[in-house]
Amino acid sequence: MAELSTDLQALHGIGSRHAQRFRKMGLATLGDLLTWFPRRYEDRRTVKEIAALSDGETVCVRGFVAAPPTVTRVRDGLDLLQVPVADRSGVLRVTFFNQLWMKAALSPGTEYVLYGKVERNLFGCSMSNPVTERADSQSETGRIWPIYPASAGVSQRTLCRAIREALLICGGSIPEFLPEEVRQSYQLCPVKAAYENIHFPENETALQEARRRLAFEELFLLALGFRGVRQRRQSDAAEAFADADMSPFYDALPFTLTNAQRRCIAEAFADMRSGVPMNRLCQGDVGSGKTMVAAACVYYCVRNGRQAALMVPTELLARQHYDGLSALLSPLGVRVALLTGSVSAADKRDIRRRAAAHEVDFVIGTHALISDGVEFEALGLVVTDEQHRFGVAQRGALTAKGRQPHVLVMSATPIPRTLAMSVYGDLDVSVLDELPPGRRKILTYAVSGDYRPRVYGFLEKQMSEGRQIYIVCPMVEASDDRKAVTEYASELEKVFPGRRILSVHGRMKAKDKERIMSAFAAGDADILISTTVIEVGIDVPNASVMVVENAERFGLSQLHQLRGRVGRGKHQSYCVLISDSRADETRQRLRVMVTTSDGFRVAEEDLRLRGPGDFFGERQHGLPPLRVANLLTDTELLQEARTAAAELSPERCPATVKRAAELLSQGATA
Ligand code: ADP
Ligand code: MG
């Protein structure tokens, strides 16, 4: 019996040149082949009589070759082989393109099974290039047949043959990671049967059972891995915070907290009192007031004689948080400092010294907080305002700063709760599902480019009332119809001659970008044109209109984030989505934006329309790849897998636990 790690050259007919092409597809070993799962299946079981065939259907026909095949050379490089095949009901004309070798294989008087797409017209029935086998030795017909993701160098047929052989010679060495008792209680088939049937299913039931078993295994190992991460953390003691008088903080707020904010704060406080490090995700729509949840936790931490840190993705955001939070917290006796890349070396040194001597209670900063190696004397809480998701391992690096500080992660992209539990499986989740009262709905319109003059007229009106405008276009350089930021800016200068227009794009240096965005935030411009860089939290209460050009190019969640840049002040705000696309899918998506202002619903729709792979896009989400399971549709299975993982006694199956940990660390570094 071969091992999973055996090179696939061990297979018949695969030499070094062939193996090279397999390797290009990421397939080097027999084990790789076995996890190369079919993309879809063809049901090649239905056999029909020729007289009963209908145009366009794909089925099997069983018949005899009625006359010797004829060969026609249509032109150079195109040979036709034609042969009539008959059953008792009629005759099928069969054509093979460039497969002259079939000629010898087709002998008159012999019975064959042909699987292919039927063309039926006035002149009768025909098939082109059907899968053809002798009726007495069927292997690719008469069953459900796998269709693999193939490549130019490695054909479907080669893959099938290789995978079949791999199953035969090492199917018995596939490790069974699901403990017997789990398989029993959830009625999951053994691993070998699952692999055999995911590739070459005996029937639909076997295929469903194989799929269920393999998806379960993925979700189970994921859940088990997260459980391990949690348990390791929970075996670390964190200082249990004591009750503290929060009334100075609440009294200082210019508003009363929403119920959702109170609930999240209570959940976080309970964590920090527990003696186990908090590891909590606070999810909420744009504008739901996540900052105040963080501020309450910071105040609570400082009242407990500890220091806190807040990490945000950009300088501008760090400064905005600094301005807002020091105005709130300094009068309450919290010593706040700002540390970003642009702080002078002398100031950085000073902040580092004060952090180490506990002369500052709360440091707000960018990644510089980590990269400049700030040491805290008594770090009790790390908050990250997370625009992009960190992998499990990276989250770990943030907390290595202190001796087991509490961790609060703020997520700007609401995702459905079940998904949050798997993507952030090592975190507890709090949801801010309520907006502060009195928010006006952002009025959203989806229009075509013809409306641009009217949109401009509307913008002029808004600006004459003193408001500011964001305009987003998707690309830096003009290519095809994409509006370049710079081109767009000069065009707009002609439309709005007296207006101050600034533009930023992704290719600018971070410093220049920040400078321009700060100028806009300070009211030094009427219009800010940009690519999506403004997605990353900027807070300009005076901005009332968000215009998005080529809106079809953005994901729904992204559009929702962009829209969240307006409506942050007291003015009625608007979002105008411009798109000339007539595609149904685009219209459907933009329709969601127009009718829905709830970020969770937008995210759900986005996931539904695009699937989780595209939803997360290139973003690092820290998950090992799931080959079979679908986080969106396998919700029930996900629940079962989580329960099974929670109930497992790890000491009884060390190999499974080890595998789960390995998978998770792969995901984090991938
Ligand atoms: P986000 O969740 O997007 O980070 P913020 O924390 O920036 O939201 O809050 C958005 C705005 O709402 C801020 O101007 C903040 O001062 C205000 N805000 C937060 N909580 C409340 C509340 N309970 N009542 C009224 N306004 C609030
Ligand atoms: Mg925020």
Image (cartoon, rainbow, N blue to C red):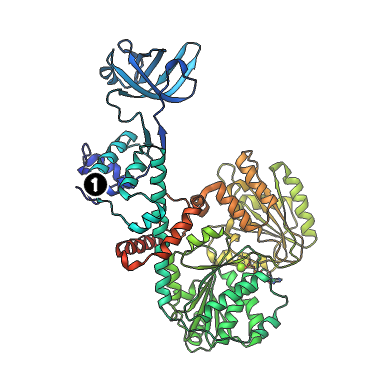
Tell whether 350 sits left or right of 595. left
Horizontal and vertical percent position of residue 479: 55, 44
> Is 123 located above or below residue 607 in the figure?
above
Label 1: which secondary element: helix
Tell whether 393 sits left or right of 287. left
Query: Can the viewer see residue 529?
Result: no
Tell whether 494 sits left or right of 171. right
> Is 263 located above or below residue 528 in the figure?
below
At a point 39% along the width and 50% down the height, the residue shown is: 213
At a point 41% along the width and 65% down the height, the residue shown is: 647
Image quadrant where one finds the C terminus: bottom left
Q: What is the tally of numbered marks visible in this picture?
A: 1
Front residue (pair 285, 72)? 285
* Ligand 2 within 8 angstroms of badge 1 C-beta: no
Name the quadrant containing residue 600: bottom right
Horizontal and vertical percent position of residue 280: 52, 71
Query: Can the viewer see residue 384?
Result: yes
Label 1 sits on residue: 170
Front residue (pair 553, 382)? 382
Q: Amino acid at mark 1?
A: Cys
> Is 241 located above or below residue 25 in the figure?
below
Picture quadrant of ligand 1 = bottom right
At a point 43% along the width and 70% down the height, the residue shown is: 230
Horizontal and vertical percent position of residue 84: 36, 13
- Mark 1 crowd level (few <14, some 14–19, many ≥20, 10 Å Cα): some
Front residue (pair 386, 659)? 659
Tell whether 397 sits left or right of 608. left
Horizontal and vertical percent position of residue 50: 43, 16
Name the quadrant containing residue 290: bottom right
